[in-house]
Amino acid sequence: MVARLVVAAPSSGSGKTTVATGLMAAFTETGLAVSPHKVGPDYIDPGYHSLATGRPGRNLDAYMCGPELVAPLFAHGARGCDLAVVEGVMGLYDGASGQGELASTAHVAKLLRAPVVLVVDASSQSRSVAALVHGFASWDPEVRVGGVILNKVGSPRHEELLREALDSSGVPVLGALRRVPQVRAPSRHLGLVPVAERRAEALESVAALASQVRDGCDLEALLALARGAGPLSGAGWDPCGAFPSPAPSRDRGSAPDPVHRPSASSSNAGRAENGTPDGHQSKESPVVAMAGGAAFSFAYAEHAELLAAAGAEVVPFDPLHDEELPPGTRGLVIGGGFPEVYAPELSANEPLRKAVAELAESGAPVAAECAGLLYLARELDGKPMCGVLDARARMSEGLTLGYREAVAVSDSVLAEAGTRMRGHEFHRTVVEPGAGAAPAWGLHAPERRVEGFVQQSVHASYLHTHWAAEPGIARRFVERCKA
């Protein structure tokens, strides 16, 4: 039983990240062990959550992992904690397009039996706030809106008007935050600038958010609300028990149970501690290098945990600074991030580009998602990359964004042809051609198309997937590394 709150809002831009991160940091400062979570596929907010709590930020995605995995993944991440704070996505009731409530903040709150704190941007209203809160609190009787935090309040008089209006709503005001521009994190073409690119400034921002929330919110009332969450049944997800035996081909993007991510390191000395399920390295454990650092900061914690549970020694490295792959590398995972921002620096690291190309040529398994795909191309915005794929990448004006239904088109180091998955695309780049002779995935929504590349032991694609939904991916990858 972990006390828990879901921080939601009527719409994006209301201040969910400000409030959630501030709450995480403020409660952590009181000595509580706080578990941070984020609804949906977002990679950037969990970085700030991790900074606020000292624990891995974890995602809860009912679309990619299936509703049945939300509570087990939550329990895995929150194990041993006093409090969990879950930041929502978009508006409270906004879910996957055309899928009703699926993957919405409200859906996840119900799966977690957790009370909701509604963050309202009060900057352009007074009495109308009561109608807004009443509507959200009464829309779905299964969603318990246990309190309101008023954000962007202009003055003491403005706050007084807002509180008077909400007196009769039945939803208590648990905080009021003034407009404080200096604690806003800078944004870029895909959202906030990741923590990995501005750690010192991010630490200052998180500390300022903690101070703002501590001064403006009733932490005791919020903690009492969190402790009133309903009990959750079932065991937490366990990466060591996630693999089916034997491993049948699964037919959708859901899986049994959860796992941990190593932080990126600027040197090859920082190795993951749990190369085998019991936490000890074995001589048979293949080294799987995992890209990190400022250019490749997008990764789900569970991926490294599953690789380790499957028997790999997961070793982080930073392609911006490390000129060699970790010693003994037998497999390579390159996740998402912002290589387009660091294209000159990545290109200048010629020794590492050559090492990656040689590893791929040797037949060692390579899994690349989104940013990893760009890095494996011949060039990115005219700058030479690894040249593993006969493709060129460039920035574009259009944003590709959304959940995807996918089926593996070709047998690969990750999946058998025909394996069905759910994933997510989020990029402002274009790769030409968009697919190789053996494409990685066939996508069914919003339009039918093939994308990505499977060649030798390389799997490269724009599609972000969550391996907890299909743990066999990690086991298959590690087995290929051993071979």
Image (spheres, rainbow, N blue to C red):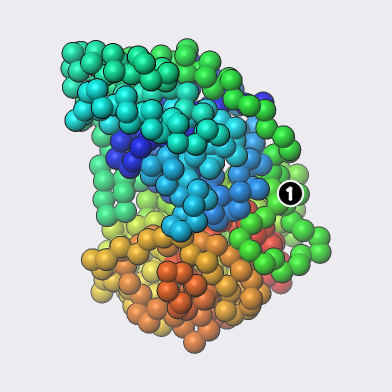
Dividing the image into 4 quarters, which one contains the N terminus?
A: top right
> Which residue is disc 1 drawn over?
240
Does the image show residue 296? yes
- Give the image location of residue 441, x and y in percent: 52, 74
Nearest the eye: 459 or 23 = 23
Determine whether 304 is above or below 8 in the image. below
Does the image show residue 53? no
Query: Which residue lies at the image location 29% right of the left edge and 40% below the top edge?
Result: 13
Determine whether, in the image, residue 172 is placed left or right of residue 178. Answer: right
Determine whether 69 is above or below 425 in the image. above
Determine whether, in the image, residue 1 is placed left or right of residue 173. Answer: right
- Give the image location of residue 97, x and y in percent: 43, 57
- Give the image location of residue 350, x and y in percent: 37, 69
Nearest the eye: 107 or 470 = 107
Nearest the eye: 318 or 95 = 95
Nearest the eye: 274 or 250 = 250
Q: Secondary structure at mark 1?
A: helix
